[in-house]
Each structure stands twice: as C-alpha cells, then as structure tokens.
Image (cartoon, rainbow, N blue to C red):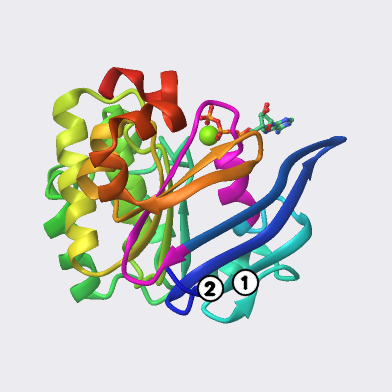
C-alpha cells in the first residue's frame, strides 16, 4: 500500500522499555481504516507490549504513534481511550463479583446504556442476555472473552485493540468468537487483533504484520499469506505450526 493514507493508526520507529530492558526496537505498523489487521508472532515477540504502548500503558521512548492524524505520544491512557480506542487485554479485566450487567455499565458513559448500542451488542453476543444478572466470575473462559469484547464496543469505537481473544478456548467457543468478530468486521470496525490461532487469522484478517524480537519483520495482505505455505512456515514457523 502507499504512504498509509487510509491508516487509522500508524506506528513509526516505536521503541519501548520495560524497566531496564528495551522490548520494542523500532516498531513500524499500520492499521488501515475499516480493516482487520492481524498482529502475529511467537511468544515474547512484543505483541502485547505494542498494544499497551498504543494505549499509553507503557510509554514509547522514541518514535511516533498517530491515530487518525493525532499524535498519541504525550497523552495519558484515559485521554487515548476517549479518542475512541478500546483495548481488550489478554486477561480481559473482568470484575468477577459484579454481574454481567454491572461489568457492562462500568464501560458506558455516565448516562448509562444507550438502547441502540445495547441492542447491537446483545445481538452480537446473545449469551450475555441469558447471563445478564449472573456474576461475571461464573462465566466460562469464552463467555468472559465475549463480555470483555462486548464491554469494549458498548460505546461507539473507532479502533479496537484485542489481545489473543481465543487463547485457551474450545473449538466451539473459538467458532462463536470468530462469528462475533466477523460481525464487527462487517460493520467496518477498524481492529488490530493479536492472535496465535492461524484459523482465526485466516477467517477474519484483511492485513497482517508479523513481529519478532520487538520489530515488525513482515507485513502484507492476509490473502497472500494464506496462499503461501512456504511464507507461513518461514514467518510463523512453530508458533502456528499446528495450522500450517
Ligand atoms: N512487565 C514486564 N516486565 C519485564 N519484562 C516484560 C514485561 N512484560 C513483557 N516483558 C518482556 O517483553 C517481551 C515481550 O513481551 P510481550 O508480552 O509483549 O510478548 P507477546 O508477543 O505478547 O507474547 P505472548 O504471545 O506470549 O503473549 C518478553 O521478552 C517479555 O518477557
Ligand atoms: Mg501477549
């Protein structure tokens, strides 16, 4: 692609330290508007650190992070969230003792649920209707993931950052989650999705970027990666070997 004109999010030369250690070594990444970008790579490559750096949870020491033309570098996390970026972390951040409804309320504006937003989310995740007044701690792993994503989209968002939503889920749950992601995709939501399951990447990804040792080592169209088994093997090797 050219010059990133349709970039909703652009990272250029982003370096991040955690404590004494340099974890990101100049990350260049684009998430294009209305598309699903898969962030792939083996354990410890720096995928989660990249998402946390975008959200301002780690500070970039160097480099540019630009969201829809606006630099995020100097902004605090709540400000970044208010610009319309939602983050679903690996551990989901669900409050187990609160009900599903209460967890959802925490993610809404002070005025409470806007009915059209709530209807849209419950259409995507009908399971939440059934569990609405249950403690979130009683949900299965997959149901908690759905709640975490539902919470992230209860207010209109411009960009979703989702970290390994299918980790540890049964194939049936993965299927349901893929269905929900495809519905978000159909609404032209811009998503940056970290995923280790190649079948999920195949089903929902438009573009991909592969990370290794704190850098992006390859980017392209997901269709090109799907078509090229040798490239899959070279880029992803054992990290996704089961699916290759
Ligand atoms: N809080 C932390 N303190 C120290 N080092 C950390 C911390 N978080 C991550 N790291 C290190 O940073 C590197 C990148 O970690 P990161 O969690 O970003 O990788 P990842 O690609 O998300 O991996 P995974 O697929 O296992 O989730 C790893 O070497 C990790 O050990
Ligand atoms: Mg991670």
Q: Is residue 132 left or right of residue 40?
A: left
Q: Which mark is residue 181?
A: none
Q: Residue furthest right?
A: 20
Q: Quadrant of residue 111?
A: bottom left
* Quadrant showing the C terminus: top left
Circle 1 residue: 79
Circle 1 packing at 10 Å, graded few (<14), some (14-19), many (20+), is: some
Q: Position of residue 75 (x, y in %)?
A: 70, 70
Q: Are marks 1 and 2 in contact (CB under 8 Å)?
A: yes
Q: Is 33 a magenta residue?
A: yes
Q: Position of residue 18 (x, y in %)?
A: 78, 39
Residue drawn at 49 percent across, 34 percent down? 41
Magenta span: 31-53
Circle 2 residue: 82
Determine whether 114 is above or below 61 in the image: below
Disc 2 Cβ-to-ligand 1 distance below 8 Å:
no
- The Cα–Cα distance between marks 1 and 2, rounded to whole angstroms, is 5 Å
């Amino acid at each position: 692609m050219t010059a990133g004109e349709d970039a909703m999010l652009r990272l250029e030369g982003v370096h991040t330290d955690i404590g004494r250690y340099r974890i990101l070594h100049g990350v260049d990444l684009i998430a294009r508007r209305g598309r699903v970008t898969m962030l792939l790579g083996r354990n410890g490559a720096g995928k989660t650190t990249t998402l946390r750096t975008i959200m301002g949870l780690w500070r970039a020491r160097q480099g540019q992070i630009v969201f829809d033309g606006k630099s995020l570098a100097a902004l605090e996390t709540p400000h970044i969230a208010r610009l319309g970026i939602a983050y679903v972390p690996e551990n989901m951040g669900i409050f187990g003792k609160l009900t599903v409804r209460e967890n959802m309320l925490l993610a809404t504006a002070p005025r409470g649920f806007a009915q059209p937003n709530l209807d849209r989310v419950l259409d995507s995740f009908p399971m939440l209707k059934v569990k609405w007044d249950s403690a979130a701690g009683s949900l299965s792993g997959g149901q908690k993931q759905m709640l975490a994503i539902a919470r992230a989209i209860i207010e209109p968002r411009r960009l979703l950052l989702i970290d390994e939503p299918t980790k540890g889920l049964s194939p049936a749950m993965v299927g349901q989650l893929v269905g929900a992601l495809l519905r978000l995709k159909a609404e032209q939501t811009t998503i940056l999705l970290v995923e280790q399951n190649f079948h999920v990447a195949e089903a929902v990804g438009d573009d991909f970027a592969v990370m290794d040792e704190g850098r992006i080592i390859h980017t392209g169209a997901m269709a090109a990666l799907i078509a090229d088994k040798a490239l899959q093997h070279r880029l992803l090797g054992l990290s996704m070997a089961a699916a290759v």
